[in-house]
Image (spheres, grey):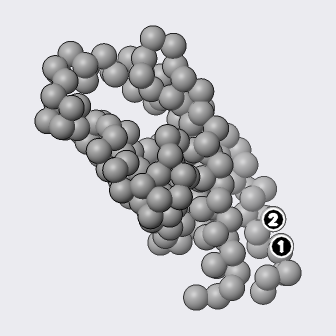
Amino acid sequence: MSTKRLIYIAMFTALITVGGLISVPIPFTQVEVSLQTVFVIMAGLVLGGTDGALSVLVYIAMGLFGLPVFTKGGGFQYVFMPSFGYLIGFPMGAFVSGTLCKRIKTVTRGKVFLCAIVGCIPIYTIGVTYQVLILYYYLHSAWAAAIMGVPAIGVLLIKDMVLCGGCAALYPSLMRAMRGSKRFN
């Protein structure tokens, strides 16, 4: 693995960490909006599926080993948080978006946007499923507690669609900048 690849992986691990620390609570829900998902998807788009997923796995490992990089801290006990399922889905989301984007022959912002949106699907599928299972089986909340999160998930989907549009808009510039950086070759 080259030094350049390691630096890019570390850079996106740091961006995902910062994105998780910037969060805004959604009124009348128990959900906080963070920028993690957009940096996870951007890691996949820019670094490719494998390196994007690797940057996310490094982030998750740091959090599970106790570094306070997750939205609400860190440590192995975070596995029992309802939102941990989204973290489980992050490597898959980065891998899917990155793999799809690298297969595009003619890159356009619209195609990059679609790759980003498709990359969000495993994140939400795994995240929502895990959230419902933790709420029901571990926290013994009623199904009503899990269903209360549906409007919040709708807000998160809208937020991520807007941010995926931002990823698609920034993608060409980022790729030009990364290709032009001869400093790490």
Please tell me in which quadrant of the rendered image residue 175 appears.
bottom right
Task: Tell me, yes or no, if residue 94 can be seen here.
Answer: no
**Residue drawn at point x = 25 percent, y = 24 percent:** 146
> How far across and how far down the image is residue 64, in percent?
42, 59
**Residue drawn at point x = 21 percent, y = 16 percent:** 144
Q: Quadrant of the C terminus?
A: bottom right
Q: Estimate how packed mark 2 is, as few (under 14), some (14 to 19) or many (20 or more) residues with alpha carbons within 10 Å.
A: few
What's the amino acid at mark 1?
Gly
User: In the structure shown, which secondary structural element does the residue marked by tag 2 occupy?
Assistant: helix
What's the amino acid at mark 2?
Ala
Decide: is 58 above or below 87: below
The CA span between labels 2 and 1 is: 5 Å
Image mark for residue 180: 1
Decide: is 133 above or below 118: above
User: In the structure shown, which secondary structural element does the residue marked by tag 1 occupy?
Assistant: helix
Q: Quadrant of the N terminus?
A: bottom right
Question: Considering depth in this image, is 76 or 16 the residue closer to the camera?
Answer: 76
On screen, residue 79 versus residue 43, left or right, reads left
On screen, residue 38 versus residue 87, left or right, reads right
State the residue position of label 2: 177
Farthest residue in the top direction? 28
> How far across and how far down the image is residue 121, in percent?
37, 44
Question: Considering depth in this image, is 170 or 2 the residue closer to the camera?
Answer: 2
**Mark 2 and mark 1 residues within 8 Å of each other at the beta carbon:** yes
On screen, residue 109 versus residue 131, left or right, reads right
> How far across and how far down the image is residue 158, in percent?
51, 26
Image mark for residue 138: none
